[in-house]
Amino acid sequence: MQPDWPAEVHRELAAAGVRVVGYVPDAGHKRLIDLCHADRKMRTVPLTTEEEGIGLACGAWLGGEKCVLLMQSSGVGNLINVLGMVSVCRFPLVMVVTMRGQQGEFNPWQVPMGEGSARVLETMGVAVRQAGEPQAVAAHVRLALTRAFEGMAAEAVLIAQRVIGIKSFQEQRSQ
Amino acid sequence: MTLRRREVVRDLLKERKNLLVVAGLGSTAWDITAAGDHDLSFPLWGAMGQAAMIGLGIALAQPKRRVLVITGDGEMLMGLGALATIGVQQPKNLTIAVIDNERYGETGMQRTHTAHGVDMAAVAEACGFRNSELVRKKKDLGKIVHQTQGPNFLQIKVAAEKLPLVLPPHDGVHLKERFRKALSDVLAKKR
């Protein structure tokens, strides 16, 4: 049986005491976003661009709360300059990123940023954890939460497109 | 008479007590420092466009405390989407004050979009801010900062002037840690 990675990730976020979840939607994050919305202890914050999530997460930490960001790989490109603040101030940061532009991608315009995401994040000082299988996702998220909130690290868990398993535009639309 | 930014910011911060303050990159960070550096101030040396979102993060984490973001027109223009995001969240305790000199003051005083008529107070209102005001003359803004249910937006027109730099500490880790420590001290006293 396939593990239910969105439910597992939600449990990890809840167990770590995450109170704010900022997101720009992705079809691959649909269920996790729904679970966070349904959790009365979490404040979900839809963002107009991923960059806003960095301000949100840093502000939440200044105010004494933990924030996690959900986005797709295209959004990683929108973060670059503001990740400088995370690095200079050693703000804790956890991002759960669903990958596009990989195996199963139907849109070639998603490929460049998908292929560049890990390198962009690493260049800006974010540790990258690649979750290639559904059963690996929650463990990576748990480690990222620990490293970030106990060690003031910036962490991204990249969830491979084959874990999400969307193969066509029609399939995405029908979700 | 045209307002002057240092006086406006000094007035916004008078009797600040436990007000939580974020200042955007550039002139507004120098303005809040000229008014008196404070452990509950987080002046930005980068991350242009994020001052309002940092304010939202603090406001959501500390719903019982008042939060004031003081930023410039150029900085706010870089993150206008944040006004829509804040409009959705409706934080009652957040006020954003844009010190609008219609210029990019740190890069050669080039004209910003507000010099060409872009009306940010109207944008904030359209985004769902409970109160949004264009301020051109001296007035007491203490009530809106400390009491009025938000989100509140003030676009305060000021003279375009080059002023002496009054720089805050620039070690980011120090700025972050002093803010968290001062806030936890305030919260401990309340208990």
Image (tube, grey):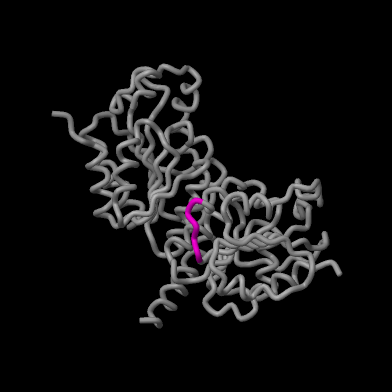
User: In which image quadrant can residue A138 be found?
Assistant: top left
x then y, percent, for residue B46: 60, 53
Percent of width and height locating residue A89: 50, 57
Residue B3, image quadrant: bottom right
Residue A80, visible in the rendered structure: yes
Residue A4, given in percent of the width and then of the height, sits at: 20, 35
Instruction: Using residue A91 as the reference point, say whether residue B49 is left or right of it.
Output: right
First to last magenta residue range: B88-92
User: Is B172 in the magenta?
Assistant: no
Answer left or right for A10 relative to B181. Answer: left
Residue sitting nearer the eye, A168 or A117:
A168
Q: Is residue A151 visible?
A: no
**Magenta span main SS:** loop
**In the orientation shown, which residue stands out farthest toward the right?**
B1
Location of residue A111 with respect to A30 vertically, above or below: above
At horizontal 68% and vertical 52% (from top left) the residue drawn is B122
Between residues B170 and B104, which one lies in front from this camera angle? B104
x, y percentage for residue A45? 43, 49
Q: If the image is split into quadrants, where does the N terminus of chain A sit? A: top left
Q: Which residue is drawn at 44% across and 71% down?
A: B64
Identified at 47% across, 23% down, the residue is: A110
